[in-house]
Amino acid sequence: MISKIKGRVWKFGDNVDTDVMTSGKYINLPMDELKGHAFEEVRPEFAQKASPGDMIVAGRNFGCGSSRETAPAALKALGIGAVVAESFARIFYRNSIAIGLPAIICPGAASLGNDGDEAEASLADRKVINHTTGKVLDFQAFPDEMLRVLECGGIEPLLKQMKNA
């Protein structure tokens, strides 16, 4: 199980649009290339400086806009460990869980910290901890079915596991 996710905070605000995450002009690129353009227009350094385990922390309505499946896929391909937000656009949330990227609904997430802070999300304890500031926030539990999808790394790996069982 993905018990703990640790990394640096990348802070974003409210209403972060999927078109900003992965611009339509790159939509037909292979994922290895596309991920290098994530947030290019608003955070040009993001794709080059993001490290495995890093967390995006945001406000309300993260992932609004078009139902662009490449948006959460590019974040996962970069190694982003989780997206922690006060709320998510429904399609982004579903797409994230489907590919095994934890999308954590966390009241007060926008106040968790700042860029570069060291943070940890514990899915088992339902807590997000900013180790830089000491701030701790509780988040909503994932239903057991979603936890199982996240544990397997997405729906496809879960189905393969079930087929081989």
Image (tube, helix red, strand yellow):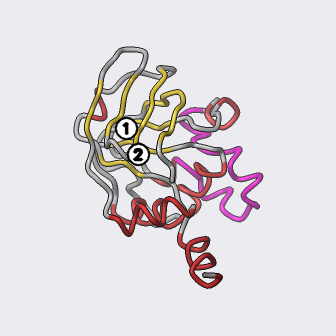
Location of residue 45 in the rendering, given as x and y in whole percent from the top left corner: 64, 29
Magenta stretch encompasses residue 152: no
Location of residue 138 in the rendering, given as x and y in whole percent from the top left corner: 25, 38
Location of residue 69 in the rendering, given as x and y in whole percent from the top left corner: 54, 65
The residue that disc 1 covers is: 58
- Tell me the magenta residue range: 21-43
Q: Residue at x 30, y 35 (%)?
A: 109
**Between tags 2 and 1, which lies in front?**
1
Asked which secondary structure carries label 2, the reply is: loop
**Mark 2: which amino acid?**
Val
The disc at residue 16 is: 2
In which quadrant of the rendered view does residue 54 lie? Answer: top right
Left or right of 100, for residue 46: right
Q: Residue at x 61, y 71 (%)?
A: 157
> In the rendered picture of this protein, how many numbered marks are placed on residues?
2
Asked which secondary structure carries label 1, the reply is: strand
